[in-house]
Image (cartoon, rainbow, N blue to C red):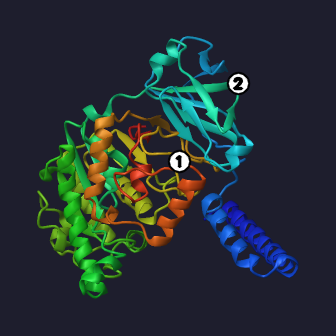
Amino acid sequence: MSARKQQLLKAHRRSKRLFLVVFLLALLLIGFLAGWWLVPVLLVLAWVAHEAWFADHLFYRPSDDYHYDFPAHTARQSVSVEGGTVRLSEPLAAGETLVLELHVKAHWLGRWLDPWVEIGDDCQAFERGVNGRRFLNLSGQATALTQSTLALRGRYCAVAATGTLWVMTNPDYARQRVMVVAPHADDAELAAFGLYSRCEDVSIVTLTQGEIEAENFQRLGLDQAQAARLKGRLRSWDSLTIPLWGGVPAGRCVQLGYYCLQLPQMAKEPTKAFGSRESQDSDVRSVRRHNPLCLPADVDGQPTWRNLVADLVALLEHYRPEVLVTPHPELDPHSDHVASTQALLEAVGLSQWKPTTLLMYANHLHDNDRWPMGPAGAGIALPPAIEPLPADRLWSPLVPADVQLDKAMALAMEHDLQGGQVFKRQLRRWIQQGLAGRRWPVTGSNEFFRKAVRRHELFWVRDLSD
């Protein structure tokens, strides 16, 4: 966690302690003056208020500006918002990915209900109390923009009268040879189901078994190690079979069988084997028998960084992808995700086959665990970027409604996304639904059904040939 986030966390805890002291003193005074029966009632009301309006985890201030730099050659043009319609100051530049930078400020009601911006038939939500520079995703709205018919208005917030439209041009990467690298089973579906289900030539490589946090399987009478092994087998099976729902045959899917949360340690000691933290296994071949080709680590089964990189080199040279899809190492903080991209780039350096493009995704965030904010089916606004990121181009292809439904069904097949919420989280949802107007999809209870099934998918683009 950065120094800025540490400072914000300390300030949050300090404010929370101060509030609790004042609140408890107020309760004592109210109990003394109005009767002690009122104290438990107020405690319950305070807890409900917290769950409804103050339970979000933000490691930044809603008044902070988002900061994005794009490549120097990126087309940009001024726009105005007049009468609730976006007006261009000049003809729209060529490009399929459109990002509107402008200031968004919450109304007083936008401190209690999620503020959002309606963009034609789309809506994109932001933090309660937002008051800063934000980046709306207008991809797919080019025709309405050109015809000056794109409506844009805030709900529970106001948008600035002027802004900057960034226009980025990309080929349709689905028409190239693509390799999707997933640290865990479900990462490929969360980030890129819409993309890979359109690809004519795609391979999907999953690095880990996903065996940890298997407490739910212990209800079957298994001990921790047995439960972890079962979960690892099931999620490995998911990684090989669920892509078929998106048109990718099992012969184009590979499970490498390394162990969750061990990739960073493997990177530090490349020749040392790191077995599972929970299953007591230390041989990656246990889940490799359905792979379509033999790989270097099949010789000794050792979970080492050297074997992982060698496996990736072999896969690059076998499938010869032009485009690699992988986690964004600066934006997605999950340690396995960061290490996965590190291993992939190391393999690219060693491989005789050189892909040309890196498409990066973020399934997790440092700063905001609700992003993308708002309901399922809405567009994906750019995520919080409070600290500078590399100046990457963006590609944000549309996901049609029927593909969104297929994506939700693919997520429903993932063993790690099945089952209901624990009672505390479900109770919080009921409170937020009743008091804060939030909605969750009926396709599944896991938060990823809301966050990942969207009008867009979003990738940061880096050219590997530079």
Indicate the quadrant where residue 282 lies.
Answer: bottom left
Relative to 209, say whether 460 is above or below: above
Q: Position of residue 120 (x, y in %)?
A: 51, 25
Q: Which class describes the residues within 10 Å of circle 1: few (<14), some (14-19), or many (20+)? A: many
Q: Which class describes the residues within 10 Å of circle 2: few (<14), some (14-19), or many (20+)? A: some
Please, what secondary structure does the residue beneath circle 1 have? loop
In front: 71, or 333? 333
Relative to 17, say whether 369 is above or below: above
297 with respect to 2 (left or right): left
Q: Quadrant of the N terminus?
A: bottom right
- Which kind of residue does numbered mark 1 sit on? Met
Pointer 2 or 1: first along the chain: 2
Q: Position of residue 43 (x, y in %)?
A: 70, 74
User: Could you tell me if residue 71 is visible in this image?
Assistant: no
- Which kind of residue does numbered mark 2 sit on? Ala
Please, what secondary structure does the residue beneath circle 2 have? loop
Q: Which residue is mark 1?
A: 373
Q: Quadrant of the C terminus?
A: top left
Q: Which residue is mark 2?
A: 161
Relative to 342, say whether 281 is above or below: below
Q: Residue at x 29, y 56 (%)?
A: 412
Looking at the rendered structure, the number of numbered marks drawn on it comes to: 2
Q: CA distance from mark 2 to mark 1?
A: 23 Å
